Amino acid sequence: MRLLSKFLALCLLMWSPMAIAWSWTLEDGQGNVRSEFTLTKDQVSIRCQCETGRLVLHSVNKGDKRQYFDGNGQLVAEIKSDGAEKFKLRIPNQSGEIKVKGDLEKLKIIVNNNEDRPLKIKRKDEKLKVYEVDGFGQEQFLGQVQIEPERKGIRVKDNDKIVRYRTDELQLSSAYGALLDQRISDELRYILVAEIMIRQAL
């Protein structure tokens, strides 16, 4: 009986939400690994190649916030949720912030409170169209996210139909559209990818 109890306890631990992790790799259009993600509902680990070099990020939950630290223990960014479909990314010692709001059907990314010029990601059938809003309020097409024919993975293409990012995953998410937002540094874009993916796929 004691042996059975230990076995059941082990099964519960293995199948608890904390134990379920999802890992995947993101490559650029040439097949070079750009980032590796491991996600659970409560923890995030990101290994990424950024403009400044190789970076390892991990998250720590603190109250209603999730903080991201680099390998040296330096705080890189802080996430604060505002309901199921809104969150803010703040950078330490900086006044600006990045707001994300919406769902898979329509999502906006707003940088430094510039509400008039968001990045918009809209679902159209089995594709996601990515737009930036210019100074005249017009939407300019940046690219799209799509599942490849024969379900060979997801591709992120720019407005010239050149593949910029790819993954073997098949879970369509606005997270991939955020990769086309050039206003945001590499490491912060990867954090946005993780945070949006947690909300849309986990």
Image (cartoon, rainbow, N blue to C red):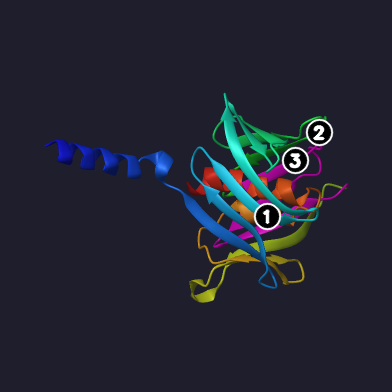
Q: Amino acid at mark 2?
A: Gly
Residue bearing the label numbered 2: 96
Instruction: Answer with left or right where residue 88 lies relative to residue 114.
Output: left
Q: Which quadrant of the view contains residue 155?
A: bottom right
User: Pointers 2 and 1 in contact (CB under 8 A)?
Assistant: no
Circle 1 crowding by C-alpha within 10 Å: few under 14, some 14–19, many from 20: many
Which of the two discs, 2 and 1, labels the residue nearer the N terminus? 1
Q: How far from the left and from the top, in percent, is residue 173?
A: 57, 54
Q: Secondary structure at mark 3?
A: strand
Q: Do tag 1 and tag 3 residues touch (Cβ < 8 Å)?
A: no
Disc on res. 48: 1
Give the label on residue 111, or none: none
Main secondary-structure element of the magenta-colored stretch: strand
Q: Position of residue 107 (x, y in %)?
A: 64, 46
Q: Is residue 50 above or below residue 60?
A: below
Mark 2 or 3: in front is: 2
Residue under numbered circle 3 = 110
Tell me: residue 30, above or below residue 92. below
Query: Which residue is the extreme one toward the top?
Result: 63
